[in-house]
Image: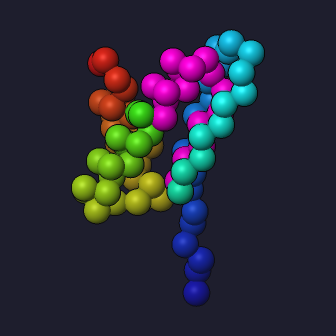
Amino acid sequence: MQEKRKSRLIGLGLDGDGQKRITTADKFDIIGGSEETHEMMTETAMKTFEDLKRKGKELEDTSPEELRDLINKNIPGK
């Protein structure tokens, strides 16, 4: 029996303000970034996974193109 593949979404903030920020959830990790960037990436990831849940999908079952579209849709202020 083949084991189900496991996936995680990793967000890496490259701007910084000297603080170390890490947010970990069931299916994603957000690392680094300024306070504003870190919050924006965390909100984007949370909304993206809410959309996947509404669709009855898991990250492992989502194509890269669909994931890209969901992330872009969920960026705050877009």
Give the number of callouts.
0
Locate residue 9, reporting x and y percent.
55, 45
Q: Is residue 35 above or below residue 50?
A: above
Q: How was the colour assigned to the protein in this rendering?
A: rainbow
Q: Name which residue lies at 74% across and 15% down.
A: 18
Q: Is residue 19 above or below residue 68?
A: above
The magenta region covers 27-42
As for residue 73 lying within the magenta part, the answer is: no
Viewer-nearest residue: 66 or 36: 36
Query: Quick check: 68 left or right of 17?
Result: left
Locate residue 37, reporting x and y percent.
53, 20
Query: Quick check: 78 left or right of 37?
Result: left
Q: Can residue 57 be seen in this snapshot?
A: yes
Residue 65 picture quarter? top left
Locate residue 6, reporting x and y percent.
57, 62
Q: Name which residue lies at 64% across and 14% down.
A: 15
Q: Can residue 65 be seen in this snapshot?
A: no
Viewer-nearest residue: 57 or 25: 25
Query: Quick check: 69 left or right of 21?
Result: left
Locate residue 76, reporting x and y percent.
34, 23
Residue 61 picture quarter? bottom left
As for residue 41 lying within the magenta part, the answer is: yes
Q: Name which residue lies at 60% across and 40% down.
A: 23
Residue extending furthest toward the left: 54
Position of the C terminus, as image quadrant, is top left
Query: Quick check: 26 left or right of 53?
Result: right
Position of the N terminus, as image quadrant, is bottom right
